[in-house]
Image (spheres, coloured by chain):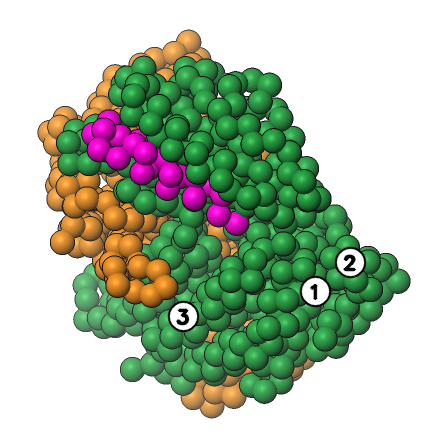
Chain colours: A orange, B green
Amino acid sequence: MINGKNLIDGVWVGSDNVAHSADLAGQSFALATKAQVNAACQAARRDFRAYSKTARGERAAFLRAIAEEIDKLGDEITRTGMAETGLPEMRLIGERGRTTGQLRMFADLIEGTDYLDIRKDGALPDRAPLPRPDLRLTHKAIGPVVVFGASNFPLAFSTAGGDTASALAAGCPVIVKGHSAHAGTADLVAQAIETAILACNMPKATFQMLQGSGREVGSALVQHPEITAVGFTGSLAGGRELYDQCHARPHPIPFYGELGSVNPMFCLPAAMDARAAEIGAGWAASLTMGAGQFCTNPGIAVMVKGDPADALEAACVDALRKTPEQKMLTDGIHKAFESGVKGVSGLIEEVAGCGTAKAARSGLPALFKVTARAWMANPILQQEIFGSAGIIVLCDDVAEMVELAEILEGQLTVTLHLDDADADLAAVLMPIVEEKAGRILANGFATGVEVCSSMMHGGPYPASTDVRATSVGTLAIARWLRPVSYQNIPSALLPSELRE
Amino acid sequence: MINGKNLIDGVWVGSDNVAHSADLAGQSFALATKAQVNAACQAARRDFRAYSKTARGERAAFLRAIAEEIDKLGDEITRTGMAETGLPEMRLIGERGRTTGQLRMFADLIEGTDYLDIRKDGALPDRAPLPRPDLRLTHKAIGPVVVFGASNFPLAFSTAGGDTASALAAGCPVIVKGHSAHAGTADLVAQAIETAILACNMPKATFQMLQGSGREVGSALVQHPEITAVGFTGSLAGGRELYDQCHARPHPIPFYGELGSVNPMFCLPAAMDARAAEIGAGWAASLTMGAGQFCTNPGIAVMVKGDPADALEAACVDALRKTPEQKMLTDGIHKAFESGVKGVSGLIEEVAGCGTAKAARSGLPALFKVTARAWMANPILQQEIFGSAGIIVLCDDVAEMVELAEILEGQLTVTLHLDDADADLAAVLMPIVEEKAGRILANGFATGVEVCSSMMHGGPYPASTDVRATSVGTLAIARWLRPVSYQNIPSALLPSELRE
């Protein structure tokens, strides 16, 4: 059952400021006050030392307990998530599996010590001209962490999602700012974590959850002196505002913002000759999955004009026209999508104007076409439209394709569709796109982010605010760790992993 | 022979804005113009792709060639450095060895692949419900880097110092902002690198050096759109200003600033009973080494009041009174030292007032004494005085010592002087100081930073602007790298280290 309150220091607390849910009949949520933000941050700091000192095995058991509790609440979470987000049942069941899978992946990770990057340089007492002391290095938890859930992943990127799982694994207490797009789902997941805290005897403030609308709670959280790092997935405007607040603090802190991307696809000529229609149909499927509400949704397809380009367009249009309208995550996202499509419609040719959806908060896909010259000249066309909107970008020749790659802004992903005969052009494009993106794909679609050790989900700004960091995969834990060096420290005082 | 110009894109260029050296008779230096800053940044970007694509073995050979060229110029560098910085001959000879040692250490490092943190997740085509693609991750060079040399290490932390060596090793072109405190030394080292560039056939703009006074050249460099990361060692005020500029950019970039530290020493009771005088004499030696101009100079010693504390004080005072005056690095640093000492003198008891030095730009050590209560209450006493100034902080009991540890700001180092009988108190202090510093020492002095794989030179703000980063040791290379993931990319297009 949904509490409708904030979880602070082990207690569910209400407030005078209550928001009524538009999606859950009769349900309301108490929005956190500034005093509650402060209380949560103080509690997180108080419990940081105890939690960060827990053995890695204890934290692994705790992460697995959270996964189990989420599994137990499964159907209720799925029903609530469906009502709040409009996402279909199978998607939410799958996302729950990804969420618990992530928690168990980080549990496995911290049972080993690879992620600590342990280094030892033994003493050399006889070295001339100076002896070398005994030096050992490991990585320690950075401190209390704030996590902002994503609108588009109510489970896998939210309350107990990747940021929370990796920060808890690292030994950092987490305060989640519940996303207003799925406050009830956040509430249920927070209860699952609360149960795991009690079962595993973890400090009460190991995990806390505050509800808030607008940016007031978020701003207060990231500027609180006891907070040491922030994980965020969301819009460029909102993310940049919080980023600026983090860096203007008296003591600045890292802000890991994943702010979205256009995810360009380059369709090389030989691949187009061989299977333009197949690429076009695959793109339509990728572009419309989850109403196009993925950070890695491929927003543009770049190709040389001609018959294969026409075939790709025809196949894509055909598939898009068969796509039913889909409910979007929030009214705000739906409005932004409609407005983005309208803005582009006024500028360039719409080749699949699918019309206006009938149901409220629902969208239909849109496909546009433009010359590379015009696309490069207009920054509006280069911006992400969050939702099922794609642009075919037509180059005069491959030289123009290379020119376009050179002017790309930072991206989460870049995809090359290529065949063997495209090798020379691909060899020219690769060093360019490697500078632009966190992940490079061949012959695939960027939606569908594998959670594994070699995943990089991030990229040069504006794709993310920290090009060195990933928010998906085991490397994500590095965001919440800092190196500490120990010189001649007696064994009993060393972190256990540094002892002989 | 000193050029007195700026090295831009392989050419030494002058300007109308010339500064005359106060230390090198008849020598002047052309200060870079804004147009020259722009030219250097553009050239660095142009050559980034070619340089970052060089084989690791080629870059290793290049780093070794720089070390050889610096060795060849050895005596001239030492003489010039002595004239400019006032540092003694043996120190500069030692620092040259450290500089060439660092270059060779990074050469060794990049001949292996450990630093790339390579990860591979092979394809699982039969996995249900979805197949797994082939995913591989490595780390790539971040882009053109700007390095600000340190005033206090004209060789090891400047033109070809640790930041430059690690960035060049990573595959990033470097633009050094020559430090005005040793413009001639910077000029000579830049020539050594230039020779190595030609000998190794590296792109011309792989390394460039711009002279500048004030912050104009520095501000223009860090705000240039083609620059992707900055390494800085210097003052809190100057570093914070550049940090703010980096994060306010349209596309923010990492700023790795090492801004100094008070480096507290905690002298535990049993150790004090056993060897208070020894600790006091050792502190005096550490405090006055290099006129106290080390980032890791121990500025305060915290102990319980009583006879051992008096013995420590007496031994320290005795040693300090025998210390001759020492020339400081610059007029500005000398003035700041005198002013810092004067400021503290007005607030608390000076126990070794060593008077005013006779020679210009020279300093004599100063030692103060204060209660822990008073020290904790006054932020002015908690600030670093760059130079040979120390404060004995007297606690009523060990509880107050723990209380003081809790309120410490971020530090590069914290030292515990302890004996076996101090184990219980040390166990209380360790988790506290681990949160405060990048390096924890037992029974040593923090000056003397070992360059090795397990060194961490950095710490929570204000010690450094990025608690995750070190500017000394092999881990320093991580500052200039970013992860990139490759999904189903044909082998021929992969970075060589990711191929089967």
Residue depth check, mark 1 versus mark 3: number of the one nearer the observer: 1
Say what amino acid the circle numbered 2 marks.
Answer: Ser
Q: Which residue is mark 2?
A: B21
Say what amino acid the circle numbered 3 marks.
Answer: Met
Q: How many marks?
A: 3
| Circle 2: element type | loop
Which span of residues is magenta-colored?
B263-290
Q: Which residue is mark 1?
A: B184
* Residue in front for this viewpoint, A334 or A266: A266
Asked whether the viewer can see residue B23, the reply is: yes
In the rendered image, residue A50, in percent from the top left (x then y), is placed at 22, 30
Drawn side of residue A37 relative to residue A51, left or right: right
Q: Look at 40% across and 24% down and name the residue there.
A: B393
Q: Look at 58% across and 22% down and name the residue there.
A: B345
The quarter in which the C terminus of chain B is drawn is bottom left
Q: Report, in whole angstroms, how far the alpha carbon at label 2 lies from the one at label 1.
A: 9 Å
Residue depth check, mark 3 versus mark 2: number of the one nearer the observer: 2
* Residue in front for this viewpoint, A27 or B413: B413
